[in-house]
Amino acid sequence: AQRVTQPEKLLSVFKGAPVELKCNYSYSGSPELFWYVQYSRQRLQLLLRHISRESIKGFTADLNKGETSFHLKKPFAQEEDSAMYYCALSAGGGNKLTFGTGTQLKVEL
Amino acid sequence: GAVVSQHPSWVICKSGTSVKIECRSLDFQATTMFWYRQFPKQSLMLMATSNEGSKATYEQGVEKDKFLINHASLTLSTLTVTSAHPEDSSFYICSVTETAKNIQYFGAGTRLSVL
């Protein structure tokens, strides 16, 4: 069975500081990895996915199969980045997602 | 992306009653929808896959007779919590999947409080 681990429940950084939200997964095959974000009082929405290999709102994430990681990074945090971030894995077809427990990012001024 | 409407956003009911939650895809024909449950400060747990025109597929440990799912059209899936009890109090979230792109679009969720 697949599993997604986000070790940090809360990450607090100052505005302008680099951000790294950690995500590790366990799956024996080739999964597809996603980051979903939930801003205050809003619904969950897709931030980025590893197959797109694009930067969204300054965030990037690289799939490291050797370390089974998919960490989310941003070089300079902004106040509007404060939100709940969920790493998710899709594997085995059927489009089902397995979510991590989420990391609350708080960007302080 | 797809626009997903979930109704109601909050419901309070007495123990023993049944509650129906609707999930509508407003601009997208969804053959597959998902239902999740989220306890406070915990992650989303997949309950079931809702398939248009066929029976839902439930995850291990989810009682199919307790959580009835109907997906009668390409734009509507319903989750009925039957004979609700206080332990069923939770946040229920649906999603619509764009199958070809493997992307899910989420509803705003329904907070169920069973007294």
Image (tube, coloured by chain):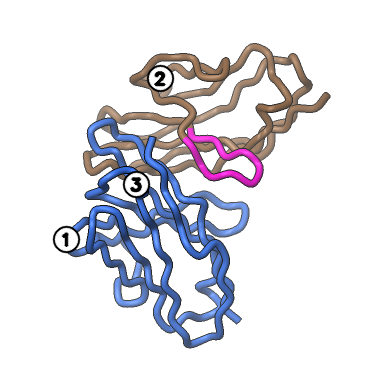
Chain colours: A brown, B blue
* Quadrant location, the N terminus of chain B: top left
- Discs 2, 3 touching: Cβ within 8 Å: no
Q: How many marks?
A: 3
Classed neighbour count for the residue bearing mark 1: other residues with Cα under 10 Å, few (<14), some (14–19), many (≥20):
few
Badge 2 and badge 3 both on one subunit = no
Vertical comparison of A50 with B28: above or below: above
Image location (x, y in percent) of residue B52: 20, 57
Q: Amino acid at mark 1?
A: Gly
SS of the residue under disc 3 = strand
Circle number at residue A63: 2
Q: Which residue: 53% across, 74% down?
A: B87
Vertical comparison of B112 with A43: above or below: below
Circle number at residue B96: 3
Circle number at residue B53: 1
Q: Amino acid at mark 3?
A: Val
Which label's residue is closer to the chain start, 3 or 1?
1
Would you say the magenta stretch is mainly helix, strand or loop? Answer: loop
Q: Amino acid at mark 2?
A: Leu
Q: Which residue: 39% across, 54% down?
A: B46
Q: Nearer the viewer, residue B8 or A75?
A: B8
Image location (x, y in percent) of residue B15: 53, 85
Q: Quadrant of residue B80?
A: bottom left
Give the magenta part as a residue range: A36-45
Q: Nearer the viewer, residue A56 or A32?
A: A56
Q: Nearer the viewer, residue A71 or B27?
A: B27
Left or right, B36 with respect to A22, comes to left
C-alpha gap between disc 1 and disc 2: 36 Å
